[in-house]
Image (spheres, helix red, strand yellow):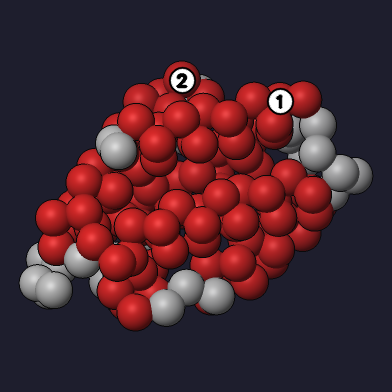
Amino acid sequence: MDRLTADEQLTLKTGAFGAVFLVSNAVPGVLGMVRESIAASGALADAGGVVKEALTTGPLPQLPRDSALEIESVVLPALGRAVQILRAKSPGDVEAYRSVVLAAADRVAQAHRGMEPAEAAAIDKIRVALAEAA
């Protein structure tokens, strides 16, 4: 396994944190966002190895905040790129990354009044982005 560069770690982080942000943003509400961020942090903390190191070190990713389309245009490619990076440098961690990202997204969706259609749609886009890099 090769060590990830700082840029590669940031790509993994952008994908994971961005996925959470995408789902959280799908249904507006400040109180919900607080519950959702707590739920997501629990799932991201469950990561191990290279994935945990990437998600817990270095700067936070800069995510657009203006529109869902802008967020998607950054996050979805980052998820695909993250899978490609892991496949090249740490193939054993590809499935762990996918699982952690999807678990965090799912926890966010369930954290406030259960999953709503907009959240389910966001999770579907995340799942596709993680699978397309296969």
The answer to whether residue 91 is left or right of residue 60 is left
The answer to whether residue 102 is left or right of residue 113 is left
Q: Secondary structure at mark 2?
A: helix
Is residue 63 visible in the rendered image? The answer is no
Say which amino acid is labelled 1.
Answer: Ala
Q: Distance from label 1 to label 2 (Cα)?
A: 13 Å
The picture places residue 13, in percent across and down from the top left corner, at 35, 58
Furthest residue in direction top, as rendered = 69
Pointer 1: what residue?
118
Q: Can you say which quadrant of the picture contains the C terminus?
A: top left
User: Mark 2 Cα within 10 Å, few/some/many (few <14, many 20+)?
Assistant: few
Pointer 2: what residue?
69
Q: Can you say which quadrant of the picture contains the N terminus?
A: bottom left
Q: Residue at x 24, y 61 (%)?
A: 91
Q: Residue at x 38, y 47 (%)?
A: 15
For the residues carrying marks 1 and 2, which lies nearer the camera in this image? 1
Say which amino acid is labelled 2.
Answer: Leu
Q: In the rendered structure, find residue 103 and report the number of the disc placed on it.
A: none
The picture places residue 51, in percent across and down from the top left corner, at 35, 69
Is residue 23 visible in the rendered image? The answer is yes
Q: Indicate the quadrant where residue 129 lies.
A: top left
The picture places residue 17, in percent across and down from the top left corner, at 46, 53
